[in-house]
Amino acid sequence: MSNLISKKIRGFRDILPSEANKFIFIENIINKMMLSYNAEQVRLPALESLNLFKRSIGETSDIVTKEMYSFDDRNGDTLCMIPEGTASCLRLALENNLIYDRGPKKKRLYYIAPMFRHERPQKGRYRQFTQFGVEFYGDQSYHDDIDLLLFISNLFINLDINDIKLHLNTIGCNNDRQRYSSKLIEYFSRYENHFTDEQKKTLSKNPLRLLDTKDPSLQDIVSSAPSIDDFINKNAKQNFDLIKNELSNLNIAFVHDTKLVRGLDYYNDLVFEWKTSRLGSQDAVCAGGRYDQLSSIIGDKEIPAVGFAMGLDRVVELFEDKNTFINIGLANISKKNHSIHKLVQYIRDLDCDFKLKIMDKNKTLTKQIKQADKEQCELLIIVGDNEISNNRLTVKHLRAEQKDRNVSLAEIKDIILESS
Ligand code: ATP
Ligand code: MG
């Protein structure tokens, strides 16, 4: 098409039916599973105040310094397209009194929403992408951490996605990280001539972020850096051991990755990422952790929380399409111009999953059969004048070696189920 008045904007993408179908399939599984975890869906607004993210993710984070779509609106308010859901969901929960009632209230929320980041577009990295996020509020015990990881693990099992591994770490409390930061500054300063001006700034403001760098030239320096493990307080370590033990009991494989610190400011104790080797450098599929202080930064209440966000575009990329429903064709060869709307409605109302494709009535039966075959139909339901007067249908099997059958309306459902 050369005469379109405009084409899509760089970094944004059109999701066509074959991919949208995978989103639908995955979202259906998510919605069903979330019920059994007692989590409820919320819908986040696409715009928030820019301050919400500056205060929560951190002024020096990549997202806030480089990736925000922010602007002043007509009232002069500084807004942004949401780059992530955790801060936004917590803002929603606090503002609507969902998680506090004279004390922290337990609540589990989830969202599936578009996020916006001005990043360098490449496969698996878009400027608008969909995150599925889950947040468990009000419980500080490691059992919520486990339940969350169990959910993610089961979701991947249900989606039959195997090449994926859980990496986890503990980043302890503020105090631990401060002591570790000083040590990191001391270490990285020895290599300062390898750093860009921006990396030098990160080093002075938040050296932990350098561990998260994607710059290949720093990988050796980062891998020899001191480990956060030596700075973690005893309680956090014990708690982390409990988590690891329980994961082993549950047969959830994991790697203790002492370099995993996450690029956002609000985490404490448990942090995790699920990584795959199948998506090149866009290897992070899901990331999260505990963030017990975020609610006192955003609001004035202390409400412990743990959550994650999963990049659904990347999950869709990993997901192998399984034909989840069959195609059924309907050929109308009635000469008397009978209306078949009632019959079509009857078939559509059968309680089973299929896609009904109505063939082109102006074609001969032979051509309609060819059309159904081309459109990957499993069955072709043929309706002619005889069928209409007798309330019967002719069914042709296009993929299986079976004779055509003349059946009553009541029988059609079983035939569809047999072929599914
Ligand atoms: P990455 O390391 O790939 O930049 P991130 O640490 O910035 O990821 P998070 O902010 O933790 O990502 O977001 C959670 C998940 O959202 C990621 O694990 C990834 O699957 C997905 N995601 C993040 N940014 C993008 C993007 N630009 N395009 C597509 N998916 C993304
Ligand atoms: Mg990123």
Image (tube, helix red, strand yellow):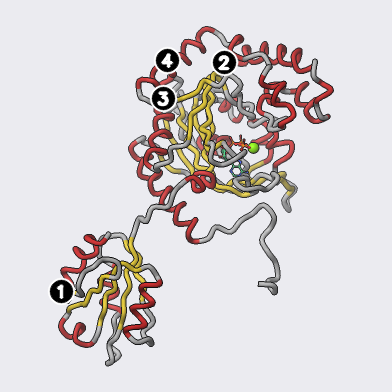
- Quarter holding ligand 1: top right
Among the two numbered marks 2 and 3 on one chain, the one whose residue lies closer to the N terminus: 3
Among the two numbered marks 3 and 1 on one chain, the one whose residue lies closer to the N terminus: 3
Among the two numbered marks 2 and 1 on one chain, the one whose residue lies closer to the N terminus: 2
Q: Which mark is residue 227?
A: none
Q: Position of residue 81 (x, y in %)?
A: 65, 46
The residue tagged 3 is 146
Q: Is residue 365 left or right of residue 275?
A: left
Q: Is residue 195 left or right of residue 369?
A: right
Label 2: few (<14), some (14–19) or many (≥20) C-alpha neighbours in 10 Å: many
Among the two numbered marks 4 and 1 on one chain, the one whose residue lies closer to the N terminus: 4
Specify the amino acid type for callout 3: Ile
Determine whether 8 is above or below 108 in the image.
below
Secondary structure state at the residue bearing disc 2: loop
Label 4, label 1: how many angstroms apart (C-alpha)?
Answer: 62 Å
The residue tagged 1 is 408
The residue tagged 2 is 172
| Circles 3, 4 touching at the beta carbon (< 8 Å) | no
Q: Position of residue 205 (x, y in %)?
A: 75, 23
Specify the amino acid type for callout 1: Ser
- The residue lying at 70 percent from left, 41 percent from top is 67
The residue tagged 4 is 242
Among the two numbered marks 3 and 4 on one chain, the one whose residue lies closer to the N terminus: 3
Determine whether 13 is above or below 168 in the image.
below
Q: Position of residue 345 (x, y in %)?
A: 29, 73
Label 3, label 1: how many angstroms apart (C-alpha)?
Answer: 53 Å
Label 1: few (<14), some (14–19) or many (≥20) C-alpha neighbours in 10 Å: few
Label 2, label 3: how many angstroms apart (C-alpha)?
Answer: 17 Å
Secondary structure state at the residue bearing disc 4: helix
Specify the amino acid type for callout 4: Leu
Residue 306 in view of the camera: yes
